[in-house]
Amino acid sequence: MEKFYLSSKKNNDVRAKKHLGQHFLNDENIAFNIVKAFTDKCNTPDILEIGPGMGVLTKYLLENKEFNTWAIDLDKESITYLKSHYPQLENRLLEADFLNLNFNNYFTNKFSLIGNFPYNISSQILFTLIDNRDQIPLMVGMFQKEVAERLGAKPRTKDYGILSVITQAYFDVEYLFTVNETVFIPPPKVKSGVVRLMRKETELGCNPKKFKQVVKLAFNQRRKKLSNAIGSLVQDKTLITEFADKRAEELSVEDFVRLTIILLGED
């Protein structure tokens, strides 16, 4: 694939719809770089693009014959446009809601995700990824910059929270680059960030549901010391002496794993 320059051409074949959170990327350079960051690390036979719009990423994905490219969109205008301009997608173009998709109906093997994600459902997309982490080992996506930064945030920072811990428990997070508002039609009111998430090879080390329960409880009262924030789970406070005077934002993923085991056991 060759590198392209900024395209200033405005295409009105598909109108961006506010209720779907659509902002169409209009920079071929950025589109190329997003796809390259994805295909460089992708080793699944199938790839699924969420919200392809007018195919600014799709065309680069289809150039790589190593993968079976799928695309999913709720927008009927986008579906009609893509059918016309990218007929090679054939029955791999889905008019459906990703958040309600039964992956087993379409993918017999592992698959990877890519997309310029609508801001209004980006967290839901992330939690769907996490819930299906054994089937989806890779995601490269564009998020609102604040969300993108939160994913890879470190302990003791203001961005570090539930989303940071739960994501980093299962994925290695790499913030790739920032995208300015001016390269979208229509321009959003905030900057965007492109992130790559790669599934960790090691397992969590405790029960995932219990881990999530402890993390959410701890951060729901993040200003309180853990001895108070997770008090409802503590039978004997001497068991958590190591963590009692700390706040949730001070604990690493590994700390939360140990805390979960102490409170609720490994299984």
Image (cartoon, rainbow, N blue to C red):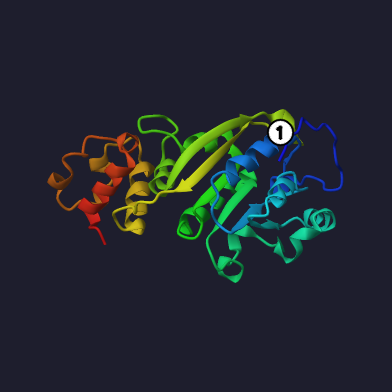
Where disc 1 sits, the SS reads helix
Residue 231 to residue 136: above or below: above
What residue appears at the point 12 percent right and 45 percent down from the top-left corner? 238
Q: Looking at the picture, which amino acid does disc 1 mark?
A: Asn
Residue at 59%, 44% in the rendered image: 38
Left/right of residue 42 with respect to residue 240 in the rendered view? right
In the displayed structure, would residue 243 be above or below residue 103?
Answer: above
In the rendered image, the quadrant that contains the C terminus is bottom left
Where is residue 162 drawn, in percent x and y? 41, 43
Percent position of residue 195, x then y: 55, 39
Asked whether 89 or 166 is in front, the reply is: 89
86 horizontally vs 147: left or right: right
Give the side of residue 35 with respect to residue 252, left or right: right
Tell me if I can see residue 207 in this picture.
yes
Q: Which residue corresponds to mark 1?
A: 29
**Residue 105 percent across, percent down from the top left:** 60, 71
Nearest the eye: 61 or 188 = 61
Among the 4 quarters of the image, the one containing residue 203? bottom left
Quadrant that contains the N terminus: top right
Comparing 12 with 43, the one in front is: 43
Give the residue drawn at x 68%, y 31%: 189
Locate residue 181, reporting x and y percent: 69, 30
Can I make out residue 187 in this image? no
